[in-house]
């Protein structure tokens, strides 16, 4: 079955898509940018750059970080970051629902149309 992938272009050089949203979800789950990057098979540098690009693009933080030390550092989604994930997933579900009949027709097993 065909599937839909959504990328939202919010402005020049400012996009949100499945990769960035998954990174945010992994940060929420692991409490760390580096652990989230590892879970997704990406370097800390790449994960950090994606977070910084989102923070800059939105003009406010999607991720809040805490410097390391004895207790260690960490990261968590800001309230806005959690909203970004929730709204993106809602858009994704709505688009998938609307596109489902069309996606079914694109599937290799779909019957030919006259």
Image (spheres, rainbow, N blue to C red):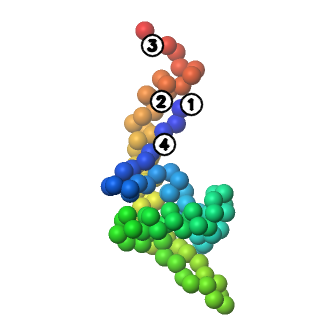
**Could you tell which of marks 4 and 2 lies nearer the N-terminus?**
4
**Could you tell which of marks 2 and 1 lies nearer the N-terminus?**
1
Would you call the spot at circle 4 few (<14 residues within 10 Å), some (14-19), or many (20 or more)? few
Residue at mark 3: 113
Would you call the spot at circle 3 few (<14 residues within 10 Å), some (14-19), or many (20 or more)? few
Residue 39 vertical placement versus 65 (above, below): above
Residue at mark 4: 5
Would you call the spot at circle 2 few (<14 residues within 10 Å), some (14-19), or many (20 or more)? some
Examine the image and state in which quarter residue 72 appears.
Answer: bottom right
Residue 110, how many percent across, how many down?
53, 20
Examine the image and state in which quarter residue 71 appears.
Answer: bottom right
Residue 108, how many percent across, how many down?
57, 22
Secondary structure type for disc 3: loop
For the residues labelled 2 and 1, say whether their Cβ atoms are less than 8 Å apart. yes
Label placed on residue 56: none
Residue at mark 2: 103
Examine the image and state in which quarter residue 107 appears.
Answer: top right
**49 or 65, nearer to the observer:** 49
Disc 4 to disc 2, C-alpha distance: 12 Å
Disc 3 to disc 2, C-alpha distance: 14 Å
Residue at mark 1: 1
Q: What residue appears at the point 52 percent right and 15 percent down from the top-left corner?
A: 111
Residue 53, how many percent across, how many down?
44, 64
Residue 49, how many percent across, how many down?
51, 65
């Amino acid at each position: 079955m065909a599937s839909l992938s959504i990328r939202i272009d919010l402005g020049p050089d400012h996009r949100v898509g499945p990769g960035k949203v998954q990174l945010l979800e992994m940060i929420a789950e692991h409490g760390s940018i580096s652990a989230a990057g590892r879970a997704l098979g990406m370097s800390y540098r790449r994960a950090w750059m994606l977070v910084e690009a989102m923070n800059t693009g939105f003009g406010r933080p999607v991720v809040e970080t805490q410097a390391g030390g004895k207790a260690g550092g960490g990261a968590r989604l800001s309230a806005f970051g959690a909203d970004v994930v929730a709204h993106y997933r809602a858009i994704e579900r709505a688009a998938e629902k609307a596109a489902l009949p069309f996606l079914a027709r694109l599937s290799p097993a779909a019957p030919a149309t006259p």
